[in-house]
Amino acid sequence: MSRIFSGIQPSGELHIGNYLGAVENWVRLQRQHECLICIVDYHAITQDYDVSALQRRTHEMAIGLLASGIDTDDCILFTQSHVPEHTELAWVFMSVTPLGDLERMTQFKDKSKKQESIRAGLMNYPVLQAADVLLYKADRVPVGEDQVQHLELMREIARKWNARYCDGYFPEPKAQLTRARRIIGLDGSAKMSKSLGNTIGILEEPESIWKLLRPAVTDPARIRRSDPGDPDKCNIYSLHKYFGSEDQTAEVASNCRSAGWGCIDCKKVLSEAISVHFRPVRERAADLRANPARVREILGAGAAKARSIAGETIREVREHMGLREGSASW
Ligand code: TRP
């Protein structure tokens, strides 16, 4: 049976881009496979962040994931920094990773452009990501398209380590892409992302979903109410495809083409569909929010399970590398 691992940054808010691009898939996969989901707080510190908010954001992310249907009977949910073996394996992998490969990563190039001085942690981000997955010898990684390059590097790291220390020890994990490969934000141009402020949070109340959708960018060529629109050029239409029934989506498209509906009418229908879709998620989140001790307990239990697998891998890795004898007494 294959083992699945995926990670998400503790941005605090789980938005519909995360949900459609990853989380929805995890909820489905957790029933069919062994599954680990990790809130990657060690990744979050590679860029500037609000220190006083990180714990709260990690907690909120756990609530969002649990409310979305991540079920700890089926899946191990934990916080990365609770399992120090992640950073140990990352160091090990740094010793086999070519610097040039790290410099070539698109995400690193994009992020480092915005920085005056580039920190080594940002460059080594994909090495830590490789450690996350390989620590559990997971072989499938359900992620969005933007992570495909990191997965390629992950396989390269596994190959390099295996070649040097132990043939076939680590698997070469494959990306498992979702149907929603890339969700565009409400600005109609960039990928939906908390840091760009173009998101709709999945726990947003119906009124605030509407407030966010109202000014969202639609087909740029449709200027007047009477202009016919092209649904295929409209980001709002692409969201209808995920939240509406087939009939409703067809109705939206034909009303757009005929200018039967204005963009506002179309957004009202979407707003309703999104708020109905996430109503049970909002309810579960409210229960969890009222019980923070329960959430901490869940993450604690997840970390304990993760550590029992991670500890075993680290013991073997040290042994293969001549670092420490494989005694049971450490
Ligand atoms: N880099 C991933 C992202 O930004 C998050 C992540 C960290 C991850 N470690 C991982 C994803 C391991 C999959 C597997 O989305």
Image: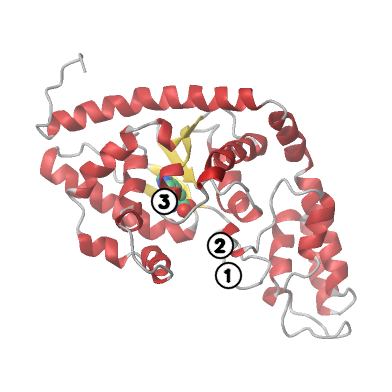
Q: Earlier in the sequence, mark 1 or mark 3?
A: 3
Task: Identify the residue at image location x=18%, y=44%.
Answer: 161
Quadrant housing the C terminus: top left
Q: Earlier in the sequence, mark 2 or mark 1?
A: 2
Circle 1 or circle 3, nearest the eye: 1
Q: Which residue is mark 1?
A: 190
Circle 2 or circle 1, nearest the eye: 1
Residue 228 visible, this orientation: yes
Circle 3 or circle 2, nearest the eye: 2
Label 2 crowd bin: few (<14), some (14–19), many (20+), radius 10 Å: some
Q: Which residue is mark 2?
A: 182
Give, as a three-letter code, the residue at label 2: Arg
Task: Identify the residue at image location x=47%, y=47%.
Answer: 142
Q: Which residue is mark 3?
A: 175
Distance Cα–Cα, label 1 vs label 3: 22 Å
Secondary element at tag 3? strand
Residue 95 place in picture, x, y as percent:
17, 48
Seen in the picture, residue 45 relative to 75 is either above or below; the reply is below
Of residue 263 and residue 330, the one placed in the foreground of this image is 330
- Determine if the C-beta at disc 1 is less than 8 A from ligand 1: no
Secondary element at tag 2? loop
Question: Residue 63 sits in which quadrant?
Answer: top right
Label 3 crowd bin: few (<14), some (14–19), many (20+), radius 10 Å: many
Q: Can you tell which mark lies on residue 240? A: none
Residue 328 place in picture, x, y as percent:
20, 14
Of residue 223 and residue 179, the one placed in the foreground of this image is 223
Q: Is residue 229 left or right of residue 135?
A: right
Of residue 18 and residue 199, the one placed in the foreground of this image is 199
Distance Cα–Cα, label 2 vs label 1: 10 Å
Question: Residue 108 sits in which quadrant?
Answer: bottom left
Residue 181 place in picture, x, y as percent:
54, 59
